[in-house]
Image: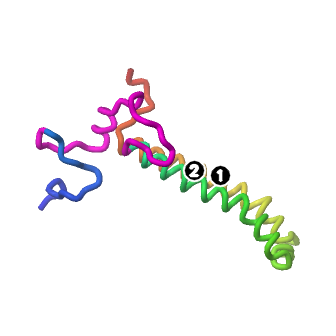
Amino acid sequence: MTENDRHDSDDERTAPDGGTATAAQRHRETNYLQEEVNLLNPSTEFMRDHLRLIWTGFIIWAVLVFGPVTATALAPETMTMTIPGGFPLHYFLVAVCAPAGALILSFWYARRRDALDEKYGISHGGDA
């Protein structure tokens, strides 16, 4: 059995003519100006995947930015202890780890968004 014979794939669905439509074909056939934009219940497959990516990145960002500050308020003895290098732990986390995490998060988002664009056949080149 080849992979195209699978019926439970998320990437393909049966088209009205009996063939299968890929996510990219469904994306090209969607008129986004006619679709409802609802952040809690996206109406298209692309919007759902992109919103999932955005919420995941937002949660990671919130933990990176607010995690050390919150941990310092909850456990000040632990977070203000001096680590090797002479810095307090909370200072090191806020000054070094949070910006580095944001940079890594931006690379992660760019790669995931490129993969999403490839899945839905979105081109950013001048193909017009």
How is the protein colored in the picture? rainbow
Q: State the count of labels.
A: 2
Q: Which mark is residue 107?
A: 2
Tell me if mark 1 has few (under 14), some (14-19) or many (20+) residues whose alpha carbon lies within 10 angstroms of its own. Answer: few
Image location of residue 37, percent across then percent down: 47, 37
Which residue type does callout 1 highlight? Leu
Q: What element carries label 2?
A: helix
Q: Identify the image quadrant of the N terminus.
A: bottom left
- Looking at the picture, tell me which residue is in the foreground, 94 or 43: 43
Image location of residue 10, percent across then percent down: 29, 54
Which residue type does callout 2 highlight? Phe
Tell me which residue sits at (39%, 36%) in the image.
Answer: 122
Overall secondary structure of the magenta stretch? loop
In the picture provided, is 71 more to the left or to the right than 45? right
Residue wearing tag 1: 103
Q: Which mark is residue 44?
A: none
- Looking at the picture, tell me which residue is in the foreground, 40 or 75: 40
Up/down of 125 relative to 59, above or below: above
| Tags 1 and 2 touching, CB below 8 Å | yes
* Magenta highlight on residue 73: no
Tell me which residue sits at (27%, 37%) in the image.
Answer: 25
Image location of residue 71, percent across then percent down: 76, 70
Q: What stretch is highlighted in magenta?
A: 17-45
In the picture provided, is 10 more to the left or to the right than 94? left
Tell me if mark 2 has few (under 14), some (14-19) or many (20+) residues whose alpha carbon lies within 10 angstroms of its own. Answer: few
In the picture provided, is 25 more to the left or to the right than 1? right
* Magenta highlight on residue 34: yes
In the picture provided, is 68 more to the left or to the right than 27? right
